[in-house]
């Protein structure tokens, strides 16, 4: 199916089998559609610190942070990963991984700010590189030996530039499934070779190629937000439950004043997790009704959970809404149980 | 029971119908094709109408949901539902394992057979699937 200008499979085999491979062994995802923006030159970290809700200036070499980019009103423009990397020849740069669907918007947003930092250059590396995620309990063990560096020693949210068969590769211990694993960035012309090598390395333990469908059910079980669903310019980070990604104290960044005001007043909506006993899947857009019969919010993501064997959903609701909740599921009223997030914790 | 897919009629929307004479009435047994079930994958939910409900050819009578999406089920014939395979929603694997026998969905007492002209014979249906698949 077409997705943000990329032609991508929803599934290779079946969503459930790909999902379960990721939970029990490992799954490979082609995530080349994610935007990759590189920042070189003195002042890169000051520029990014100004653009992002989370502090960048103290990010060590090899460090990676999940952060948000907000507008002046505190609405979320995108959620991103920012990395601080060093090449084998010793040059240092920052890499920003942004959502595919937001890449052009983010480029337009950042470009005028780059102009304020004459020593900084931004380059869009998306088309020159490919990105592969290897996720699952066996991912690190099986794929570590493919790389020159001892990448199994990387801690979560750390990354390194190393080599595979003499070709450069960025290996980060990050992901979007709730499982341990790596994300790999390679030159575009190396992508097929690396993909096939990883699949081959994990063939005997059940590695599978996985599509967008499994990526969505995995991230939903892990309660990771998806831009356009749990996040948008109309939702602030505190409503989305992402206060941890906002460093409000002692720094100045775009949206900072608005976020400090929201934080002081307290958010008016909250992101919650819902579980269902009935088998009917609950989908995005279903209304949430509270104990008083009042419409108090909307389902932002929902799917049958392959791991739990029942429907799950995340919803954005008024903070004062009274449980129990029911879901208006295309004409049927379906009782919902509020459950702590994430739905599933990896072992 | 052993229903051969070659002898059935098919709607473009992938439902099959097996029309049989029962006394003076024509009764159509209705299901969905193996091709459709394979395309849907990972079925998790099915909603069916109750006995006595009127159905109209080409109109929705129920729905089946996979992990990814909801798919409406369309009646291939006009008539009234005289039997519903009510165990099926709790045993969706049956659809995959045996779509033409134990995977039947409805029996409809037909109110006329003009709608049958709209249905495809097995060969035509296979050609359509070839183009879609």
Image (cartoon, coloured by chain):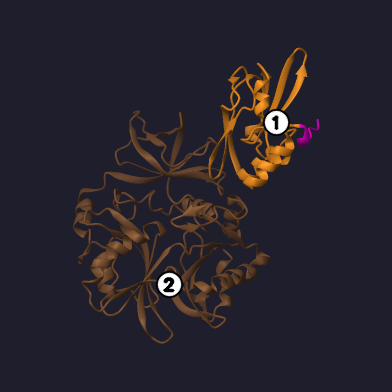
Corner quadrant of residue B31: top right
Answer above or below: position of A261 versus A205: above
Total numbered circles: 2
Q: Please say whether residue B119 is visible from this viewpoint.
A: yes
State the image coordinates of residue A125 (x, y, percent, origin top left): 41, 71
Query: Which range of residues does the magenta coloring cover?
Result: B1-7
Q: In the image, is residue A280 part of the stretch drawn in magenta? A: no
State the image coordinates of residue A228 (x, y, percent, origin top left): 38, 50
Answer above or below: position of A125 versus A237: below
**Chain in orange colour:** B
Give the label on residue B57, or none.
none
Would you name the residue on which mark 2 appears?
Answer: A158
Local secondary structure at mark 2? loop
> Which residue does the image show at 52% across and 57% down from the upper left?
A8
Does residue A73 appear left or right of residue A241 in this picture? left
> Which residue does the image show at 70% across and 38% down from the upper left?
B124
Give the label on residue B104, or none.
1
- Say which of A198 and A159 sits in front: A198
Please identify which colour was used for chain A in the image. brown
């Amino acid at each position: 199916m077409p997705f943000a200008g990329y032609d991508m499979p929803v599934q290779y085999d079946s969503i459930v089998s790909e999902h379960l491979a990721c939970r029990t062994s490992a799954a490979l995802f082609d995530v080349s559609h994610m935007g990759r923006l590189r920042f070189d030159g003195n002042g890169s970290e000051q520029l990014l610190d100004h653009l992002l809700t989370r502090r960048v200036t103290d990010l060590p070499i090899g460090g990676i942070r999940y952060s948000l980019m907000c507008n002046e009103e505190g609405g979320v423009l995108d959620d991103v990963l920012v990395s601080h990397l060093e090449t084998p020849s010793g040059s240092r740069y920052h890499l920003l991984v942004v959502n595919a669907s937001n890449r052009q918007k983010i480029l337009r947003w950042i470009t005028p700010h780059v102009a304020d930092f004459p020593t900084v250059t931004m380059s869009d590396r998306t088309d020159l590189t490919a990105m592969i995620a290897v996720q699952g309990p066996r991912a690190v063990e099986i794929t570590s030996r493919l790389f020159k560096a001892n990448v199994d020693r990387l801690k979560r949210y750390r990354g390194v530039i190393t080599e595979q068969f003499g070709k450069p590769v960025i290996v980060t211990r990050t992901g979007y499934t709730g499982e341990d694993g790596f994300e790999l960035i390679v030159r575009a012309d190396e992508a097929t070779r690396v993909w096939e090598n990883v699949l081959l390395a994990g063939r005997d333990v059940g590695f599978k190629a996985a599509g967008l469908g499994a990526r969505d059910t995995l991230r939903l079980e892990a309660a990771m937000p998806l831009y356009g669903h749990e996040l948008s310019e109309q939702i602030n980070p505190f409503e989305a439950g992402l206060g941890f990604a906002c460093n409000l104290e002692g720094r100045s960044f775009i949206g900072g004043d608005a976020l400090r005001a929201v934080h002081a007043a307290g958010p008016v909506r909250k992101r919650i997790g819902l579980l269902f006993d009935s088998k009917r899947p609950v989908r995005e857009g279903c209304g949430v009704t509270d104990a008083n019969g009042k419409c108090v919010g909307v389902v932002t993501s929902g799917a049958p959970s392959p791991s739990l064997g029942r429907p799950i959903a995340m919803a954005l609701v008024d903070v004062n809404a009274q449980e129990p909740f029911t879901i208006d599921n295309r004409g049927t009223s379906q009782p919902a149980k509020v459950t702590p997030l994430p739905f599933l914790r990896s072992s | 029971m052993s229903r051969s897919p070659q002898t059935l009629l098919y709607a473009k929307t992938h439902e099959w119908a097996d029309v049989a004479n029962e006394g003076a009435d024509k009764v159509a047994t209705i299901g969905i094709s193996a091709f459709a079930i394979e395309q849907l994958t990972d079925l998790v939910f099915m909603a069916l109408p109750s006995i006595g409900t009127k159905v109209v050819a080409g109109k929705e009578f129920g729905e089946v949901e996979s992990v990814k999406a909801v798919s409406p089920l369309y009646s291939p014939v006009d008539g009234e539902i005289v039997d519903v395979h009510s165990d099926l929603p709790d045993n969706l694997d049956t659809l995959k394992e045996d779509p033409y026998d134990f995977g039947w969905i409805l029996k409809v007492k037909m109110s006329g057979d003009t709608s049958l002209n709209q249905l495809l014979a097995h060969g035509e249906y296979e050609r359509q699937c070839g183009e879609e698949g």
